[in-house]
Image (cartoon, rainbow, N blue to C red):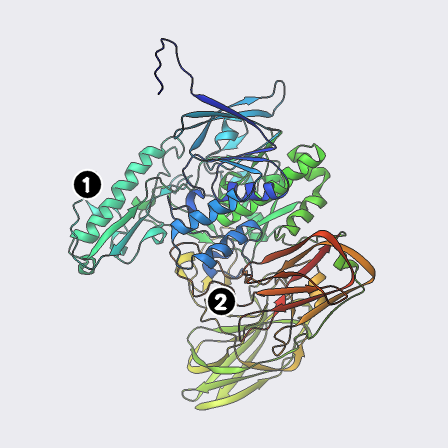
Amino acid sequence: MIKEESTYKREPKAISYSTDLVIVGGGLTGTCAAITAARAGLKVVLLQDRPVLGGNCSSEVRLWILGATSHMGNNNRWAREGGVIDEIMLENLYRNPDGNPLIFDTVMLEKVVEEKNITLLLNTAVFDLDKKDGDDAIKAVHAFCSQNSTRYTVTAPLFCDSSGDGILGFLSGAAFRMGAESADEFGEKFAPDKAYGELLGHSMYFYSKDIGRPVKFTPPSFALKDITEIPRYKTFNPKDFGCRLWWLEYGGRLDTVHDTEKIKWELWKVVYGAWNYIKNSGEFPEAENMTLEWVGTIPGKRESRRFEGDYMLRQQDVVEQKKFADTVAFGGWSLDLHPADGVYSDQSGCNQWHSKGVYSIPYRCYYSKNINNLFIAGRIISATHVAFASTRVMATSAAGGQAVAIAAAICKKYNCSPREAGELHLEELQRELWRSGQYLPQTVVSDTEDLVQKAISVTASSTLQLSELAGGAHWAVIKHSAAQMLPVSGKIPSVTFWTEALEDTTLQVELRKSSKAFNHTPDITLETKSMKLTKGKQEIKIDWEATFEEDCYAFVCFMKNEKVKLQYSDARITGLVSVFNATNPAVSNYGKQEPDEDIGVDTFEFWCPQRRPEGRNIAMKLGTPLSAFETGNLTNGHHRPISRPNAWVADFTDREPMLTISWDEPKAISRIDFVFDADYDNPMENVIYVHPETVMPFCASNVKVLNCNNEIVGTISDNHQSRGAIHFEKPINTQHLKIVLSGNSEHVPVSLLEVRCYA
């Protein structure tokens, strides 16, 4: 029993921590940063002001995680973000293909609590900080947990603000901006005017379900009475729920930091008014048995403060895919601005313009220009309002969190500032990011410690020589122009394919490529063939004249003709995909991007893949085999398809292929790292979407490693991740390393993107 009387002011319980890195904000960005930093050996305190991790992607908000893949609705092939965010998405798919947001919460929490270097403080909000005397640096943060009535003080040499609104940066005095730059400041032609608005608002979602019997709904008094106040009210339907209703947005005319509670109440008004309309207007009889299952209690924020680093990313960098020497992350979402009036606007809910491929983000965007020990990550990075319209999405932000974490590890190693980590140790920073799974566009990374780079040979029991994509039972009308992407170099071989003409007609076939070899936008037409078809099935052969001077993907395009069917193949191969000039209105893809005024973006067509079980390759025979899958891809410095597959692929008939790595003398090996093909083309949305598979069909599921005495020294079983590692407590000594792999997909040859060995 406790019994206490006092006339003195009491203080809450106080706990102090001293750590290597403080991360404020446990959204997806802060979570990925914390995991990455902990694995790099840093002691981390992660402060999250909510009861769960994830922020906008948590069960509290339920926004799907997206980034460069853009719902598979753009031309960014194999563009899913790598590293820890990739690991989380693959784990969620494996456990949670139905997209249950509560299960996703557990995936996030498990990843954090398994890292012993992380101290996680939930429900703990930062409210103050201490600065170092005479130095533009943070000394400590003060936070309060409402659930245990405890005040925390955390000191560290390094801090990361991934809080969304930038509370740490704001309190520290870090330079920031809020609102939109004028078109003149950075020459951005897409910069909005005052009428459109300078801030994106917040959104709130709801879930509904059919319970099999009539359900009455009486709206709360604060619900919107007149649904016609929402110009898009006629687009409501009972089947839409969750973040499919992303356009239920409000607040862009207000202070999106300090007016958040006001914005929340307005969004509740809209949500309950919308549901009242669906239930009680009489327009939707199919909603009779439906009930509200969940309504968000905190809004999902899009924009508030943006902090200034040594560089501000801008529109031209995104559109022109500018190459940076200090690239540490990438993006690929559209330039996606929303009208500030949100749900009350009579304009389209978004204004999206895509680039022709992914773009780079430099390290200088990830630390404060005037607070010497402050990293910035998430939607608050150093970018203009227009560039932010793309970089703000969660998967892109998570990749930035990983970059910050590796940089923090380098800061600790060399006792240097965030700025100095990029100025003095850039090569190491990029190498460690690459090792952790980060893709760095247009960046060459050298790993001199990798023993495989020093091997005298890397051989395989078989290597795919692609001569045919064998025809299957599936035939489909060319409802949308369809293309087979083929990795080529030099003279392209002839192609033979099979059609069924429903009547006499002419089929146009085009050979295209991208103007940039590392892109996958087929914006250059090299040859056009017109093939006269007679009614019925027929075999067609085309000889091409074109020669490709560099590795790239050729697009064999079968132009729209609904009088013709194409035969497809059941074979799926790493680095091969078919694409279609269809539409995906969810990401403003209407087949072609064609601005009607000069806003600084390109005109081009969208050629996008289909989701499995669709998305088969087009059946065809090649005049000469394509030799794009050799073992040299394992050591070429790329661990995903770009201008070529960048993978070793075994022959279809070799179901347990073996790689042999040989050195001129025995090597002591402590660790072997593998990169598997977990299909970087698949966005793997964590909510709403129901996915047809839990493991990517290209992913090697089992690995067995043998030494030169044919003794098994390590295994990986039932793999579903893109990265795997075998660690040895004591280094093994061997002159030859044999790696036996197998997969579970019948029509998919076994493949591997990369293998590395370290002493």
Q: Secondary structure at mark 2?
A: loop
Which quarter of the rendered picture does the N terminus lie within? top left
State the residue position of label 1: 220
574 or 21, which lies in front? 21
298 sits to left or right of 747: left
Closer to the camera in the image, 703 or 452: 703
- Spot the residue most to the front: 1
Q: Which mark is residue 609?
A: 2
Q: Amino acid at mark 2?
A: Pro
Q: Position of residue 438 (x, y in %)?
A: 61, 51
Residue 448: x percent and y percent? Answer: 77, 52
**Residue 265 place in picture, x, y as percent:** 29, 37
Q: Residues under labels 2 and 1: Cα distance?
A: 45 Å
Crowd tier of the residue under label 2, counting other residues whose Cα lies within 10 Å: few below 14, some 14–19, many 20 or above: many
Q: Residue at x 67, y 35 (%)?
A: 411
Label for residue 749? none
Q: Position of residue 639 (x, y in %)?
A: 64, 59
Look at the picture and state if 259 lies above or below 88. Answer: above
Residue visible at 74% across and 53% down in the picture: 731
Helix, strand or loop at mark 1:
loop
Query: Residue flagged by tag 1: what amino acid is it?
Result: Pro
Q: Quadrant of residue 556?
A: bottom right
